[in-house]
Structures are given as structure tokens and as C-alpha cells.
Image (cartoon, rainbow, N blue to C red):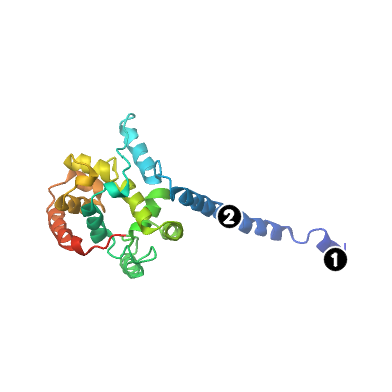
């Protein structure tokens, strides 16, 4: 058979396999991103019933108690105390109202810290990035997951305004073992509604966010008290969306 005939009959079979090995993963990644985008578009004016993080926590709780349920009750943005909003921005993301979803300076510092430790120990995440992770991703730490988090972050910032992003975050963020959202947290820790949280109460809740299950069990922690005082002093300068 001539070279021309071999070319017409299909050429090198391994080239076809290589093409599919490249195209199939690309197609799957594209479909996943499309799924994320459609979900976010829907949540612009519909509230998420749950998040990936909530479902994972409920599954973990049910391993010990099959009847266990997480505590979460959605409340609109206007029914959440401005004390809590200011405290969380002061504690978690001081530039929330101004950045495009990523605080690049904080991200660089986190990268440098991770490189020094030779493992991922810090994420430098903004409120939008934390929401992206909570909505869709696992709690694992890797640069691949961080990359997906960034893609979802830009989707959120493109399709939603800052107030809507913050409203969803306030309603789904973890505040303790099985406790999600501002309303459930206010009732769990203080026996009040999210609308009635005082400044000191709000500051303490905000400080708990990086490690809520630990602080749920160690509410008298000296670090928690000291950090709460710091956030109390910073709250008045926090800019709300």
C-alpha cells in the first residue's frame, strides 16, 4: 500500500487516541464550568438550599448520629445586623467592597508562606473565594482546587453584585459544628436573632470563622478574646457593600 493510501485509510492510529485523550478531558472541564455558571446565574435571585460544605458536614455528623441535621435558617440581608457585616469584613476581607474577588496582595503573601512551609497552609482567600469554595468545592488544600476556586470566584463577581455575594455568604458560612449562617449562629451562641446581634457578639462570631468548630468548643479561648477586641476597634471603618 502506498503512503497516500495509508494516509487516506487513517494514518497513525495513536494520533486519534491522542486527540481523544486531549478533547475528552477538555470537554468535561468545559461542562463542569458551565454547570457552575448556570448554578450561579440561578442563585442571583434564588437562595441556595444547601452547599457542598453543608452536605459534607451533614454526612460527617450522620456517621456518628444517623438522625443528625445541620442548623441553618435563611434570612434576608436587611435582617442581619450591620454589626456582624462590619465585623466579618474587618476580620476576613477588609477590601471586600473594592476588589474584583481576589486580593492579589494577600494571595501573594499566602503563596510565599506556602512555599516556605513546602505545603499549602494558607489560602489568602477573600469572602468571595470562601463562598466559591463553600458552594461547590471540598475542604481539601491543593493548587488545583485553588485554581477552580478562582474560576468560580470570577463567575460570582461577574454575575452577582457585592451585596448578593455577601448575603449568600452570611447565610451559608460555617459558625460551628453543624451550625451554618448568621441566624443559626446568633441563636446557637446568644439566643437572639441575627438582626439583634450586638457589636461584641458580632465581633466574636467573626473571629470564630477561620476555625469555627474549634472555637465552638473553646469559647473562653484567650486568643478569641484578644482577637475580638481587635475586631471591635476595626469595625467602624469597615465598608459595607
At x 23% / y 57%, what residue is drawn? 86
- Distance (Cα) linking label 2 and label 1: 32 Å
**Along the horizontal axis of the image, is 238 left or right of 157?**
left
Q: Is residue 140 visible?
A: no
At x 78% / y 61%, what residue is drawn? 11
Q: Is residue 215 visible?
A: yes
- SS at mark 1? helix
* Frontmost residue, 198 versus 122: 198
Q: Quadrant of residue 93?
A: bottom left
At x 37% / y 53%, what residue is drawn? 164
- SS at mark 2? helix
- Return the x and y of residue 57 as percentages of the image width and height: 34, 41
Quarter of the rendering occupied by the C terminus: bottom left
The label shown at residue 25 is: 2
**How many numbered circles are shown?**
2
Label 1: how many residues lie within 10 Å, few (<14), some (14-19) or many (20+)?
A: few
The numbered mark, 2 or 1, whose residue comes first in the sequence reads 1
* Frontmost residue, 130 versus 1: 130
- Return the x and y of residue 8 as percentages of the image width and height: 83, 61
Q: Quadrant of residue 187?
A: top left
Q: Judge depth for marks 2 and 1 and give the one in front.
A: 2
At x 25% / y 51%, what residue is drawn? 211
The label shown at residue 4 is: 1
Amino acid at each position: 500500500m502506498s503512503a497516500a493510501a495509508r494516509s487516506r485509510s487513517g494514518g497513525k492510529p495513536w494520533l486519534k487516541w491522542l486527540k481523544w485523550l486531549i478533547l475528552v478531558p477538555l470537554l468535561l472541564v468545559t461542562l463542569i464550568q458551565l454547570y457552575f455558571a448556570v448554578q450561579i446565574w440561578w442563585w442571583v435571585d434564588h437562595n441556595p438550599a444547601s452547599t457542598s460544605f453543608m452536605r459534607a458536614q451533614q454526612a460527617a455528623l450522620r456517621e456518628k448520629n444517623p438522625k443528625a441535621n445541620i442548623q441553618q435558617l435563611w434570612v434576608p440581608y436587611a435582617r442581619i445586623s450591620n454589626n456582624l457585616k462590619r465585623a466579618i469584613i474587618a476580620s476576613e476581607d477588609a477590601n471586600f467592597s473594592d476588589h474584583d474577588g481576589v486580593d492579589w496582595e494577600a494571595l501573594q503573601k499566602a503563596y510565599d508562606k506556602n512555599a516556605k512551609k513546602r505545603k499549602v497552609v494558607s489560602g489568602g482567600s477573600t469572602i468571595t473565594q470562601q463562598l466559591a469554595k463553600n458552594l461547590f468545592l471540598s475542604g481539601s488544600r491543593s493548587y488545583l482546587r485553588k485554581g477552580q476556586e478562582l474560576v468560580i470566584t470570577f463567575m460570582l463577581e461577574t454575575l452577582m453584585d457585592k451585596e448578593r455575594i455577601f448575603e449568600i455568604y452570611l447565610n451559608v458560612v460555617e459558625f460551628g459544628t453543624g451550625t451554618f449562617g448568621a441566624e443559626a449562629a446568633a441563636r446557637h451562641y446568644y439566643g437572639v436573632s441575627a438582626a439583634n446581634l450586638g457589636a461584641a457578639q458580632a465581633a466574636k462570631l467573626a473571629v470564630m470563622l477561620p476555625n469555627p468548630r474549634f472555637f465552638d468548643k473553646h469559647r473562653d479561648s484567650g486568643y478569641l478574646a484578644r482577637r475580638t477586641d481587635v475586631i471591635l476597634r476595626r469595625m467602624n471603618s469597615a465598608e459595607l457593600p
